Amino acid sequence: MSGLELPEKTKESSPAGQSSDTGIRPGGLGGELAAALRSNSGPAARQVGMFALFLAVGLAVGLILAWSTGHSPTVVLGNLFEGSFGNAMSISYTLSFAAPLLLVAVGTVICMQAGQFNIGQEGQVTLGAVGAGFVVFNIDGPGIVVIPLAFVAAAVAGGLWAALVALLKFTRGVNIVVSSLLFVFLAEQLMVWLISGSGPLHDDGEGVLGAGTASQSPTVPAGSRLPTPHLFGLDIPSGFVIAVVAAIVVAWVLRSTLLGYRLRILGHSPVVAHTIGVSESRIGSLAVAASGAFAGAAGAVILLGQSFQLHPGTASSIGWNGLLIALAARTKTGVSAVLAVVFGAMIAGGGLLGSDNVPVDIVNVMTASIVVALLCPPVVLVALRRRRQRRAAQVTA
Amino acid sequence: MTMANPNGSSMVTGHPMLRMAGVTKYFNGRAACDDVDLSVAPGEIHGLLGQNGAGKSTLMNILLGLVRPDRGVIEVTGRPVTVRDPNDARAQGIGMVHQHYSLIPTLSVWENIAITTKGRVQPDRITALVNETSARYGLEVSASKRVGDLTVGEQQRVEIVKCLIDHPKLLILDEPTAVLTERESQALFSMLAQVVDSADCSVILISHNLAEIRSVAHQATIMRNGRVVSRLAPSETSVAVLARHMIGHDLRNEPDVATAIGADAQVTPAPVATGTATGKPGRPPALEIEEATAFLAGGRRALDALGLHVRGGEVLGVAGVEGNGQKWLASLLSGALSLHTGRVRVRGTNIRVNKPGAMRSAGVAVVPEDRRESGCVLDMSVADNIAFAALGSLARRGVVSRRRVLALAERLVDEFQIAVASLDQPMRSLSGGNQQKVVLARELSTDPSVLVLAQPTRGLDVGAIAYMHERIRAAANAGVAVVLISTDLNEIMQVSDRIAVMYRGKVRGETPRAEADSEKLGLLMGGVHA
């Protein structure tokens, strides 16, 4: 789990925030929490320390669970590491699992920063995979042409699917949390119909899951699969390169462009945004559609880089986990990238564990513990500060 | 109105229904209530008058147990009581109908009343009680209707029934007619006459409608700055006298800000003479609002055919008791309220009011009342907050130049003497006064033709207030048309050239500052044509 120790190094170099832990902030516990979840200016050293503590607790919970069900904690830990970062091939696996997660998370950052709570990434991933499928199953050509086309189709499909949700919100006032969630199930049904017996993407051939599966598409031709260039002694999945580039571009757009400013202002305060001429329906819809487009692109990465075939489980919770990563990273692109790699490592390492007959559920518990570990520090720090202030108030009273 | 009942107090057999004596409450070293005495006889409708901040609310909050007094006694029918919380107050026979109703719109009338009772919920019993009480006082309330479907007047009747069911000794009504039509008000008053008829209940009526107090209340207590300034029988006096008592003689009628800070000695007279072309007569005023009417959700009127105009170089003070639509006027000018009918013109051009950014691009800059929510973004940096208004001009081909943002921020922080540790500091970490300066600096940096300030000095310390006033005058001298919305009459008198008084969503009257006196303003604020 060497990737997790990384934040530790920042302990000394980053100065503790000077202003934020003086005085009581108005706005109540809720406001304070929201601010702590959002802002970077907290006491960094303590936050990192707290994170390490909760991470250790999370791992310990998983290991205790493994031990109590008759598996050796050292074997579990060893296999997890071996399967994720142990050798060049493991690292390659980790990165290829991380790629679609990061793409989804990056998109989610966009809509969350704009204050649009789109949680339908799973469905947008599904439709993205379908969009990419339409291109690669129907167009013959060199990969250099087909692959970009597939990505465009995937982004358009995911983006339009998300735009429907935005349309419902801004024309009919439908709650976006509810509609985006329900659209996930619609998307899944839509894909199953497309790849089942009478659907245009159905294939009777011998697929990845074995011959004659009721709902499956053809397999992606070898020429249209994502290449894996060999760099620095590693096989780097090109999906991961795309995801990292996307993360960097999105971070820059949000931070430095006029559009990014408008989007963030809208997310912080729709009232202020209105006075400076930001139309919530326009910028908000754009943010939701963009998040859908990135989720769609993740669908393309899954289809062209991992599953090579559409089947009912293609999205395989990548959408949910990508959403989770963005939220746990407090809608920061950089933190999302680190987390996506951690999640990828857990998936890759979990795969190796499975071959040792350790149930994958244990890995899931550990992953969940890590998420909790990420969410806990700000909450605990706020609670501690409250208590300190109460004590101080009692002393002076 | 029919109820001058001078015999009301003759029924007193011994103790008054309510006696508060020597009630004192300090907040942060300032007296909100200072040695207040209040006595209400059985069967009396007692008017409680005062401007915003006079101490009425604090006094009533003490009576309801929401605020603990520092000193003083409360007696109900001669028995000293300690009121710990509103439940306690109810048990003592004190019920209050607040200005903002505490009803749950999705529940029915009887359910809303049931949630305030103890023990098992018995729908039939409560429905019967509601029907009986409403029949007794002629309050038409249907127990099974959903509260959300009722009009504001009907909702008020539900609130009153909710209180009357307990057979209170004292019923307090806070600005009850503010939301009612003329006829509904008449009905309310004849109902109140019935309530006090048997002398086992008294009413405290908080109002700033002077005519109403005069015709309805048997006795009145007038408060100012936390003290009782007068007790009288309003029917025996005139509204003018009431107005004078309410506003007081301590109005400063001098433009002392300018002289005190040595800014500019000749600010006093002409709104026109500042030399800039914007002020020349014949040109359209910088800002005109005509017949502006707007409704809120639920059909309440926010603005009622409001009209006003401001010329460049002039400060128009908008006075009035809080809650008479000033907030919505500010909303309108920041583009957050859409008009039902009416027009807003800036330098002669009609503005599409509710279009995002339309007001700002027309040259209307607003320093809003709730600066923390709608004036700035607390979790973004000081520099970003300063740059908001000019983002477009700070960007080249869609990319915001951080260098230019910082340069602008640095210049304004310097010019407006904003105390910051760093330009990247989050807005949240600044003091209220400095947050306000950031907002003002940003708004003025866009070179507006109209500057709107809503309660700009509320919550600021003396130094920050003086600074704000200086800046407002300076802006006017530079040719900006300034609208200063404030409930602080002294502030209005100090800074304005002309004063408009708002009453229930419209401008009740206007007066040049030089001709304004406490009586005139008090009458206008009380809804009486001066």
Image (cartoon, rainbow, N blue to C red):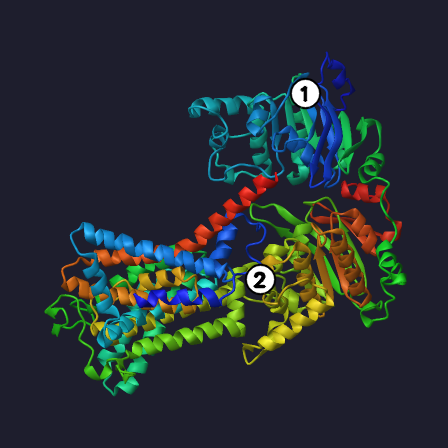
Name which quarter of the figure residue A130 lies in. Answer: bottom left
Q: Is residue A216 left or right of residue B218?
A: left
Among numbered discs 1 and 2, the one appearing first in the sequence: 1
Q: Is residue B173 visible?
A: no
Mark 2: few, some, or many residues within 10 Å (few <14, many ≥20)?
Answer: many
What type is the residue that disc 2 sits on?
A: Pro
Front position in the image: B35 or B301: B35
What type is the residue that disc 1 sits on?
A: Glu
- Name the spot of residue A324 as percent of width and height, x first: 35, 60
Chain assignment, label 1? B
**Which residue corresponds to the image point at 50% horizontal and 45% vertical from the top-left?**
A387
Outermost residue to the top: B13
The reply to whether discs 1 and 2 touch (Cβ–Cβ < 8 Å) is: no
Front position in the image: A281 or A124: A124
Q: How many marks?
A: 2
Mark 1: few, some, or many residues within 10 Å (few <14, many ≥20)?
Answer: some
Q: Is residue B8 visible?
A: yes
Chain assignment, label 2? B
Quadrant where the image shows the C terminus of chain B: top right
Foreground tag (1 vs 2): 2
- Name the spot of residue B403 as percent of width and height, x first: 60, 77
**Which residue corresponds to the image point at 63% horizontal and 33% vertical from the top-left?**
B67
Which numbered disc covers residue B75? 1
Q: In the rendered image, which residue does mark 2 sit on?
A: B426
